[in-house]
Amino acid sequence: MYAVIETGGKQYKVSKDESLKVEKLSVAGGEKIKLGVVMLVDDGKVLVGKDVDGAYVEAEVLEQNKEKKVIVYKYKAKKNERKRQGHRQPYTLIKVTDIVKA
């Protein structure tokens, strides 16, 4: 069984005991959260729309962290214009503990 969840404006395919990085959530490490289900597949049977009303995915927050630094470098040729900037995207690492059908 697997489910498609939506969080942070993105959709993720998840199954039980899977860990994944999602956009930063405002939850502390060690807490349990419930995420809404967009689609659910159970033994080849696909459930979408009203069929998944009330279904959710339980997950445990493992950690809050930042990705590796990405360097953004802009310049204009022959103009001596240069700009170097770094960015570290924050993320939340979660572990799916259960998929609950309605």
Image (cartoon, rainbow, N blue to C red):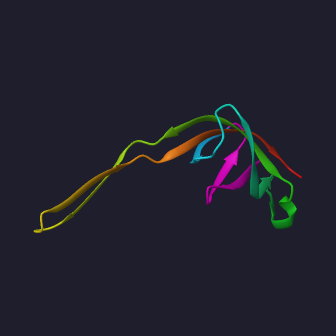
What is the quadrant of residue 54 in the picture? bottom right
Instruction: Name the side, left or right, on which 23 lies relative to 48.
Output: left
Q: Residue furthest left?
A: 78
Asked whether 91 falls inside the magenta stretch, the response is no
**Span colored in magenta:** 1-17
Identify which residue, 37 or 78, lies in the foreground: 78
x then y, percent, for residue 16: 73, 40
The residue located at (80%, 50%) in the rendering is 56
Assign the magenta stretch its main secondary structure: strand
The residue located at (71%, 34%) in the rendering is 31
Q: Residue furthest top?
A: 30
Instruction: Name the side, left or right, on which 22 lies relative to 53.
Output: left
Q: Residue furthest right?
A: 102
x then y, percent, for residue 24: 58, 47
x then y, percent, for residue 100: 83, 46
The residue located at (51%, 38%) in the rendering is 65
Identify which residue, 102 or 84, lies in the foreground: 84
The residue located at (70%, 55%) in the rendering is 4
Identify which residue, 41 or 25, lies in the foreground: 25
Asked whether 4 falls inside the magenta stretch, the response is yes
Looking at the rendered structure, the number of numbered marks drawn on it comes to: 0
x then y, percent, for residue 91: 54, 44
**101 up-or-down from 95: above or below:** below
